[in-house]
Image (tube, rainbow, N blue to C red):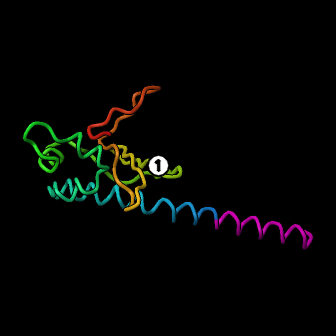
Amino acid sequence: MSMKIKSMLVAAAALTACLTGCASAEDAPAEDAARQFYAAVQGRDGERACALLAPEAAESLRTGSETCAAAVVGLDLPGGDILGVQVWGDEAQVRMTRDTVFLHRFPKGWLVRGAGCEPRGDLPYDCEVKT
């Protein structure tokens, strides 16, 4: 194998490693936000869970005299282990074993826009929490 080919292979491997590492670094904050949200819900900390929701999502849970905090802990949000994260600019999807979460990057960080989401084929996801 020529020195030029070896150099090209090493450069390609380095580029692949950088791209993989860069993608993981970009995915981590969205994944962390989803984990924090589910930890709050499972810990029945409705105030914390609502603070991790996009404003429109938090507002959508308020009905009558029920607060966001009471409503969010009353939902059946299955969660589960993280299977994968995809980030597209300011939007992200976190796939879990029993749920899919959608997030948006706001100036203060990633906030949940949709949770308790199930795919419906070609139709939009059906979510328990949504904007």
State the residue in front, 36 or 89: 89
Q: Indicate the position of residue 29 as horizontal and vertical percent values.
A: 42, 62
Q: What's the amino acid at mark 1?
A: Glu
Image quarter hosting the N terminus: bottom right
Mark 1, residue position: 91
The secondary structure making up most of the magenta span is: helix
The image quarter in which residue 10 lies = bottom right
Question: Is 120 situated above or below 53?
Answer: above
Image quarter hosting the C terminus: top left
Residue furthest to the top in view is: 122
State the residue in front, 41 or 7: 41
Residue 36 is left or right of residue 65, and the answer is right
Q: Indicate the position of residue 130 as horizontal and vertical percent values.
A: 31, 39
Question: Is 27 situated above or below 6?
Answer: above
Which portion, as a residue range, is magenta?
1-18
Q: Is residue 35 magenta?
A: no
